[in-house]
Amino acid sequence: MTRTRFASAGIVCVAGALAASAALSGTAHAAAPEFRGVVLTCQDSIGNTWATNGAGELGSSDPGGTAAQKMKLTTPMTAPIQIPPNALTTTMRTVQTSGAGAGTAWDFSGTLNPPMNIGNPIRLGPVPAASRLAAGTKVRLVDTSGAAPSATNWSVKIESHLGGVTVFTYCAGGQATGTDDFTF
């Protein structure tokens, strides 16, 4: 093979690799985190009220690629006991607000939390969506502020198995007034 042919073959290979890389990147790219205020009333299955119209913060993250997007929540509640890492199972209900899938429910769920000492804000997640949402999907926390939190009315559900006792905490409410949707 002559130098000219060898150089031409090398250029074609490099150009092909760059084109394939660009095609594979598509729309599955990492997005900057977004944060929104939430207002929640939280009550557990035993009957304890932990927050009434308390302010918290909901955040999104998108790792890009094929991995599912995630949500994390700083609740308006404080830890009544020491909570070990990854001891709380959290489900956050969101709803798609625009496009062909408007009205579709998207739950973010998992068992991930940092360790918390008594009095620390309860932080949950980041927990993933069941599958990757399409690029441009807009969601917001389901608004359940019209009724008290219960097993059938909640935007956030927390399940704990501490000290041999299973307790569910249900939080009703939604995103703070005037906050935008999350865009993935």
Image: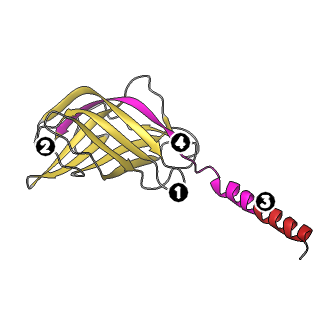
Residues drawn in magenta? 16-43
Question: Which of the image's four quarters has the N terminus?
Answer: bottom right
Q: Which residue in the structure is indicated by mark 1?
A: 66
Q: Which residue in the structure is indicated by mark 2?
A: 82
Q: Residue furthest front?
A: 3
Of the residues under marks 3 and 1, which one precedes in the sequence? 3
Q: In the rendering, at what x and y percent does residue 87 appear?
A: 21, 52
Q: Residue at x 62, y 49 (%)?
A: 27
Give the spatial CA distance, label 1 vs label 4.
13 Å
Of the residues under marks 4 and 3, which one precedes in the sequence? 3
Give the spatial CA distance, label 4 vs label 2.
34 Å
Q: Nearer the viewer, mark 3 or mark 2?
A: 3
Give the spatial CA distance, label 2 vs label 1.
35 Å
Image-quadrant location for residue 117: top left
Judge by depth and name the residue closer to the eye, 160 or 8.
Answer: 8
Q: Is residue 22 left or right of residue 166?
A: right
Q: Residue furthest top?
A: 178
Mark 4 burial class by Cα count in 10 Å: few <14, some 14-19, many 20+: some
The amino acid on which the numbered mark 3 sits, given as a three-letter code, is Ala
- Element assignment for label 1: loop
Image vertical order of residue 163 relative to residue 156, above or below: below
- Element assignment for label 4: strand
Image vertical order of residue 150 relative to residue 38, above or below: below
Of the residues under marks 4 and 2, which one precedes in the sequence? 4
